[in-house]
């Protein structure tokens, strides 16, 4: 969090950090998670949500589990569609029931109610899809056609790290040709071929620069203000974090 607090000017309170670390330790022990890290903070009207993420091996691409004290629910299409229509700030109460128009609802018999925890799960997945970033070669494709963390990754060179095309979305690809390459590849899959590059995004949506110490390169995303990624060239240090209210920037078209 040091590079984040220095560049963004935000950090967790000592109490918040302590609670988060304790919660992640308990969750890691309960589910035998090898890796669980801080994902971000989404501000609510009454209280904030501190989110953690675990990255798990998948059949081909890694999968992610998100947690706010407990694992997020799986959303069906109806709840995802409802969440997509809402634009107000979160209340900060995960049990708050939400109706069709974003107003409080009464629980109907036979169906689990749509609550703020459902909306939070939707928001986090949407943001993560847009802003989770890894440098070139941080992940590789194994002979078993699985995307795995590269144990030999020691960072980009400085002349590589200052170019946006050497950074990629850490997710299953949206581009069909990249999504299919692992399944159909017969030999070695190159490091830049199986993830979506950031340069495919809306032109100007990402800003890459050096931090104020000149030790890191940082990436900011204008679609989701509060999204911040970093990498220390010639080292294995990189990461992404989100610190915001969970809403898209409605003025992005006028900013780029």
Image: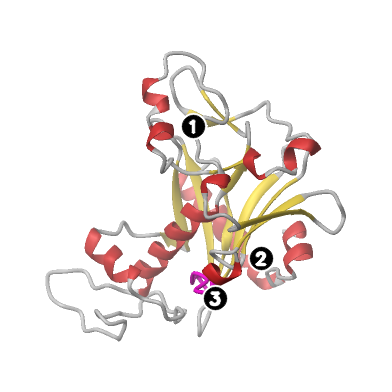
Q: Position of residue 218 (x, y in %)?
A: 72, 53
- Kindly identify the residue that appears in the image at 15 percent across and 77 percent down: 108
Please tell me whether mark 1 or mark 3 is closer to you in this view: 1
Q: Position of residue 12 (x, y in %)?
A: 68, 69
What label sits on residue 17 in the rendered view? Answer: 2
Dot 2 or dot 1: first in sequence order is: 2
Which of 92/193 is in front?
193
Circles 2 and 3 in contact, beta carbons < 8 Å: no
Dot 2 or dot 3: first in sequence order is: 2
What label sits on residue 43 in the rendered view? Answer: 3
* Residue 229 covered by magenta stretch: no
Q: Bin the neighbour count of mark 1 within 10 Å (Cα to Cα): few under 14, some 14-19, many 20 and up.
A: many
Q: Bin the neighbour count of mark 3 within 10 Å (Cα to Cα): few under 14, some 14-19, many 20 and up.
A: some
- Kindly identify the residue that appears in the image at 44 percent across and 19 percent down: 144
Q: CA distance from mark 1 to mark 3?
A: 34 Å
In terms of image quadrants, where is residue 238?
top right
Q: Quadrant of the N terminus?
A: bottom right
Magenta range:
245-251
Q: Is residue 106 left or right of residue 75?
A: left
Tag 2's secondary structure?
Answer: helix
Q: Is residue 118 above or below residue 195?
A: below
Which of 104/156 is in front?
156
- Kindly identify the residue that appears in the image at 44 percent across and 82 percent down: 91
- Kindly identify the residue that appears in the image at 54 percent across and 64 percent down: 223
Q: Residue furthest top?
A: 187
Q: Which residue is mark 1?
A: 194
Tag 1's secondary structure?
Answer: loop
Q: Position of residue 147 (x, y in %)?
A: 49, 30
């Amino acid at each position: 969090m040091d590079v984040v607090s220095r560049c963004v000017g935000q950090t967790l309170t000592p109490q918040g950090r302590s609670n988060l670390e304790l919660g992640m330790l308990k969750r890691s022990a309960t589910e035998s998670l090898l890796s669980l890290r801080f994902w971000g903070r989404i501000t609510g009207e009454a209280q904030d949500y501190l989110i953690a993420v675990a990255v798990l091996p998948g059949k081909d691409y890694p999968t992610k589990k998100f947690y706010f004290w407990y694992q997020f629910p799986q959303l069906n299409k109806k709840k995802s569609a409802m969440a997509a229509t809402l634009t107000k700030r979160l209340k900060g109460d995960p049990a708050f029931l939400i109706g069709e128009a974003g107003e409080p609802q009464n629980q109907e018999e036979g169906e689990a109610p749509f609550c703020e925890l459902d909306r939070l799960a939707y928001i986090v997945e949407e943001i993560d899809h847009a802003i989770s970033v890894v440098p070139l070669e941080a992940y590789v494709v194994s002979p078993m056609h699985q995307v795995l963390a590269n144990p030999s990754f020691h960072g980009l060179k400085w002349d590589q790290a200052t170019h946006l095309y050497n950074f990629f979305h850490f997710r299953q690809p949206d581009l069909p040709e990249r999504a299919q390459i692992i399944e159909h590849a017969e030999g070695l899959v190159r490091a830049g071929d199986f993830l979506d590059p950031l340069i495919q995004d809306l032109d100007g949506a990402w800003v890459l620069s050096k931090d104020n110490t000149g030790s890191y390169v940082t990436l900011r995303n204008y679609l989701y203000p509060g999204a911040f990624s970093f990498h220390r060239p010639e080292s294995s240090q990189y990461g992404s974090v989100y610190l915001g209210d969970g809403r898209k920037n409605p003025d992005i078209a006028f900013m780029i």
